Image (spheres, rainbow, N blue to C red):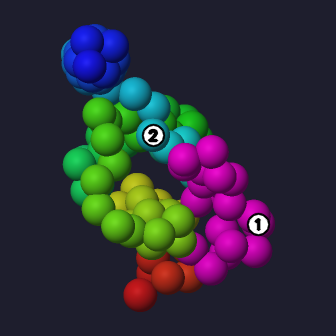
């Protein structure tokens, strides 16, 4: 029983330390056309910052049940057409990027 309590406490402490560490990178994108000035947008709780063609999304967590394509099209609609998109260890294919940008335009 004592080992279970210790394990639970260690888990809580590790989670607290991770949360206290601040935002983490949750997504990355490349714009089709680079921006002349840095551009920022908050998209569903994720802070996106674009400099040139490179965009990085940071937050403590990307909440919601949006799928990969929905996340991409939401970002594209907010910051502009994308040449690449990745989040959660997944990288979008070129054909899916075309779909993402088309959906963002609707």
Q: Between 46 and 81, which is closer to the camera in this rendering? A: 46
Q: Which mark is residue 51?
A: none
Q: Is residue 44 visible?
A: yes
Q: Is residue 24 above or below residue 46?
A: above
Considering the image in quadrants, where does the C terminus appear? Answer: bottom left
Image coordinates of residue 42 in percent, x first then y, are: 25, 48
Whole-angstrom CA distance, mark 1 to mark 2, is: 20 Å
Q: Is residue 105 above or below residue 13?
A: below
Q: Which residues make up the magenta segment?
A: 82-100
- Identified at 54% across, 42% down, the residue is 28
Q: Residue under circle 1?
A: 94
Quarter occupied by residue 6: top left
In this rendering, position of residue 67 left or right of residue 83:
left
- Identified at 68% across, 73% down, the residue is 96
Image coordinates of residue 25 in percent, x first then y, are: 45, 32
Give the mark nearer the N terminus: 1 vs 2.
Answer: 2
């Amino acid at each position: 029983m004592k080992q279970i309590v210790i394990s639970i406490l260690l888990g809580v402490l590790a989670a607290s330390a991770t949360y206290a560490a601040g935002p983490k990178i949750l997504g990355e994108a490349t714009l089709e056309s680079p921006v002349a000035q840095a551009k920022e947008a908050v998209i569903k709780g994720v802070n996106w910052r674009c400099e040139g063609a490179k965009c990085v999304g940071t937050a403590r967590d990307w909440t919601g049940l949006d799928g990969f394509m929905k996340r991409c099209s939401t970002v594209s609609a907010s910051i502009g057409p994308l040449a690449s998109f990745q989040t959660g260890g997944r990288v979008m294919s070129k054909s899916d990027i075309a779909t993402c940008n088309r959906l963002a335009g609707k």
